[in-house]
Amino acid sequence: MPSRRNEHWRETQLTYDGSVGRYSEYTHAVIRNGHAIVVQRCEQIARDLGHQLAILDVGCGWTDFYPRLSHVIGTYVGVEPAMVQLTRAEPRSNQYLMLGVGERLCLCDSCMDIVLHVADLDHCFDVGKAIQETFRVLKPGGRTIILLENRGRLSNDIRRLFNREISHGVEHLYYFTVEDIQTLVEPYGTIEFLRSYGFLLGFDLLSRFLSREVIEVLATLSDRVLGKLFATKGQHFVVCASKKEDGAAATIRFLCPQCGTGFAWGDKTCKSCLREIRWIREDMVDMLAEELK
């Protein structure tokens, strides 16, 4: 891997504190909309399966998504590379936290109902490997839900017409379109849900002078109208893809990052290779001793 890119990843991801930029009220409305879609998909999957879910949240931060999904969670596993975020997480009885990365998930094959990627894939070092790992740990028929900001958004098309710069912030290593994600997912699964949203143009500025309630109404109306005309051109998008049916589901098992042998939560040493299992606290294990090289 190129050393400059490796260094950039470490500088931007291992120390990221999860702070939110100064977004406009409209952008906050778009973010709330996307999070609501993710919750609705999880609720629908729980209804379809008829049981509480085993959910893996990659790039979980301080597990701020957990409270929104607590009513459908059976087991929650969070993976996050930034210690400053992970250690802010509230301990919970059905929650297991790993300091780690999406490119190397220390979980056995076919054990998760859902893998969440909420605004994290554009922060990964190797997104292809992260997607491969996602489908490896999903049960047959399990789903991954991916939320991202959209490089193919309508506003960027307009910027190109006027030769304006299109940027995504120095902390992002990628900037995806819907088509990019479709291509990444295609070898492993089938996209069963796609929604792009956030179609108001110019409202980052105008929303400074309008109430939150008015912004919410205008955002909803624009999504309903323009979403039909430009299905993949919103500011953000959510994709839900199911793993191709093969094999059998497994119970959750945590794996030694050195030899891949299963270990019980709380073990201090891998019984196979004798590697020390490093604990940050009793519900938080350090799997990032050897970050991406």
Image: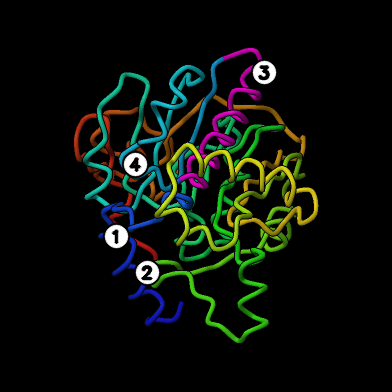
Q: Amino acid at mark 3?
A: Leu
How far apart marks 2 and 4 lie (CA) works out to 18 Å
Residue 289: mark in rendering:
none
Q: Which of the pair 265/191 is nearer the observer?
A: 191
How far apart marks 2 and 1 lie (CA) works out to 8 Å
How far apart marks 1 and 3 lie (CA) works out to 36 Å
Residue that carries the numbered disc 1 in the rendered image: 14
Task: Name the spot of residue 112 as percent of width and height, x first.
Answer: 56, 31
Quadrant hosting residue 94: top left
**Is the residue under label 1 in contact with that under label 2 (CB below 8 Å)?**
yes
Task: Name the spot of residue 1 as percent of width and height, x first.
Answer: 46, 77
185 inside magenta stretch:
no
Mark 2: secondary structure: helix
Mark 3 closeness class: few <14, some 14–19, many ≥20 residues within 10 Å: few
Structure colour scheme: rainbow
Task: Identify which residue is drawn at 34% across, 41% down.
Answer: 98
Residue 49: mark in rendering:
3
How far apart marks 2 and 3 lie (CA) works out to 38 Å
Of callouts 2 and 3, the N-terminal one:
2
Residue span colored magenta = 29-51
Quadrant hosting residue 161: bottom right
Q: Amino acid at mark 2?
A: Trp
Of callouts 4 and 1, the N-terminal one:
1
Between circles 4 and 3, the one closer to the viewer is: 3
Between circles 2 and 4, the one closer to the viewer is: 2
Mark 1: secondary structure: loop
Mark 4 closeness class: few <14, some 14–19, many ≥20 residues within 10 Å: many
Residue 9: mark in rendering:
2
Task: Identify which residue is drawn at 44% across, 27% down.
Answer: 68
Of callouts 2 and 4, the N-terminal one:
2
